[in-house]
Amino acid sequence: MFRVDLNCDMGESFGAYKLGNDEEILNFVTSANIACGFHAGDPATMRKTVKLALEKGVAIGAHPGLPDLVGFGRRNMDISPQEAYDIVVYQIGALYGFVKAEGGTMQHVKPHGALYNMAAKNPALSKAIAEAVYKVDPELILFGLSGSELVKAGQSIGLRTASEVFADRTYQADGSLTSRRQPDALITDPAQAVQQVIRMVKEGKVASQQGVDVPIKADTVCLHGDGPHALTFARQIRELLQAAGVAVRAVGNR
């Protein structure tokens, strides 16, 4: 039986600024990556998002990012492995407090944006992030780009890992995501995105922009919740996956 988790980045509103449609999208995903205040989010947003996820039975993960609110955590920073360790421990701890206060448990950790992309290729950074997760709670699942250094680091230290793929992003021949600076980085057609996901889950392959198939492992699929058609996209992808015989459930539910 084929199965996959659907995750979405959430809790990215900040103060008076509202981003995303978390309450509605939580009806269609199985894991929520909640911002921890560095790249987005604030204490009130964290509390509200944790409560919503628990009410809807969606698994909760910390979504630590670089300390870059203005750049939404998508700009590279020249941080050391020690700094990466410190900011990840700090942010997991912040979200953990709200999860525990609401009577829930945390399932996973997924780095955000530039931190995620940097760790995908940097072994030292990946090791620091994996150690941060392991030392806070070795039962947490580490989400990382399929085939990345982050997944390797998590496995090496003894963490359970989830290889992540993207429904609405195009891929390069080396298995990396096409840069958002490129015009062909995003897939806007839900049908095309679903077919890409189904192939990744069932065949373990994805077509690259260079026209060659790339081997890929798909434990969890990222859906972006901040696009203009995010809600429709989330609903369609869940329905079409289930129609294709792919069970949709959180990675923590074996």
Image: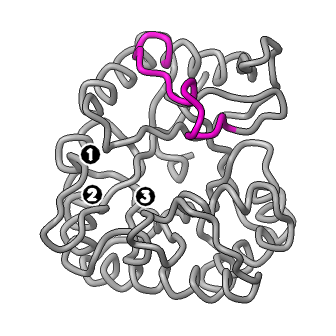
Image coordinates for residue 115, horizontal then vertical, percent: 62, 65
- Of the two numbered discs 3 and 1 on the same chain, state the one appearing first in sequence: 1
Q: Which mark is residue 53?
A: 2
Question: Is 51 a magenta residue?
Answer: no
Q: Is residue 43 above or below residue 116?
A: below
- Of the two numbered discs 2 and 1 on the same chain, state the one appearing first in sequence: 1
Q: Nearer the viewer, mark 2 or mark 3?
A: 3
Dot 1: element: loop
- Horizontal placement of 177 versus 11: left or right? right
- Residue located beneath label 3 in the image: 33
Distance from the alpha carbon under mark 3 to that under mark 1: 11 Å
Do tag 2 and tag 1 residues touch (Cβ < 8 Å)? Answer: yes
Residue at horizontal 86 percent and vertical 66 percent from the top:
123
Q: Is residue 124 above or below residue 191?
A: below
- Residue located beneath label 1 in the image: 26
Distance from the alpha carbon under mark 2 to that under mark 3: 10 Å
Which is nearer the eye, 81 or 26?
81
Residue at horizontal 18 percent and vertical 49 percent from the top:
23
- Horizontal placement of 134 versus 90: left or right? right
Image coordinates for residue 7, horizontal then vertical, percent: 45, 45
Image coordinates for residue 124, horizontal then vertical, percent: 85, 73
Q: Is residue 210 above or below residue 130?
A: above
Residue at horizontal 58 percent and vertical 17 percent from the top:
196
